[in-house]
Amino acid sequence: NNTLSGFIPSQLGQLQGASVIVEGNSFDDNSTAPLSLCTFRSVIEFDLATDTELCPVERNALSDFYYSTKGTEWTDSVNWLDEFSSYCDWKGVTCDEDKKYVIKLKLANNGLSGRFRGSI
C-alpha cells in the first residue's frame, strides 16, 4: 500500500541483479520510466516493463539498435540512451506529431557498425 508519486528514480536501474517492483503507485503522467529499467541493462525484473506508457516500445527498440550498431563509437549520439529524454529528441530520430512513433531514422555518416539484433 505504498503511495509513491513523481518520477521513478534512474538510480533504481543501476541495481545490479535486482527485481524492481513498483506497481500500484501514482507516477507522473507523461513521464517515462528510466531507460535502464525498461531494457533490463542491470536489473533482472521490472514489473512495469510491459507498460508502454512508461516503457515505450519504440525507445526500447532504438536502445537495442544503439547497442547492436556500436553506438558508443558513433560520431554523434546526442541524447541517445538518456534515461528520461524522449527518444524523439535523440540525434537522427524523427517522430510523428504525437511523438509516439518513429517515422524516420537518419544516421548517415555516423560511424555505425555491427549487426542488427532480432528485437529490432
Image (cartoon, rainbow, N blue to C red):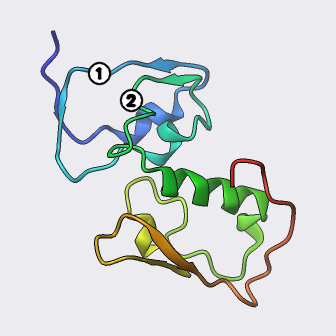
Tell me: residue 115, above or below residue 90: above
The residue at the far right in this view is: 114
Q: Nearer the viewer, residue 104 or 60?
A: 104
Please report the residue visible at 86 percent of the width from the left and 60 percent of the height from the top: 115
Please state which amino acid type lies under the numbered disc 1. Glu
Please report the residue visible at 44 percent of the width from the left and 53 percent of the height from the top: 83
Tell me: residue 47, above or below residue 104: above
Tell me: residue 40, above or below residue 115: above
Q: Residues within 10 Å of mark 2 (few under 14, many from 20)?
A: some
Residue 88 image position (x, y, % from top left)? 42, 71
Please state which amino acid type lies under the numbered disc 2. Leu
Q: Quadrant of the C terminus?
A: bottom right
Residue 104 position by quadrant = bottom right
Relative to 34, 41 lies left or right: right
Residue 108 position by quadrant = bottom right
Q: Indicate which disc, 1 or 2, sits on the residue closer to the N terminus.
A: 1
Q: Quadrant of the N terminus?
A: top left
Question: Judging from the image, what secondary structure is the residue with disc 1 in?
Answer: loop
Q: Which residue is mark 1?
A: 23
The residue at the far top in this view is: 1
Residue 95 image position (x, y, % from top left)? 42, 75
Q: Which residue is mark 2?
A: 48
Discs 1, 2 touching: Cβ within 8 Å: yes
Relative to 110, 83 lies left or right: left
Question: Judging from the image, what secondary structure is the residue with disc 2 in?
Answer: loop
* Separation of marks 1 and 2 at Cα, in angstroms: 7 Å
Please report the residue visible at 17 percent of the width from the left and 47 percent of the height from the top: 29
Residue 13 image position (x, y, % from top left)? 48, 35
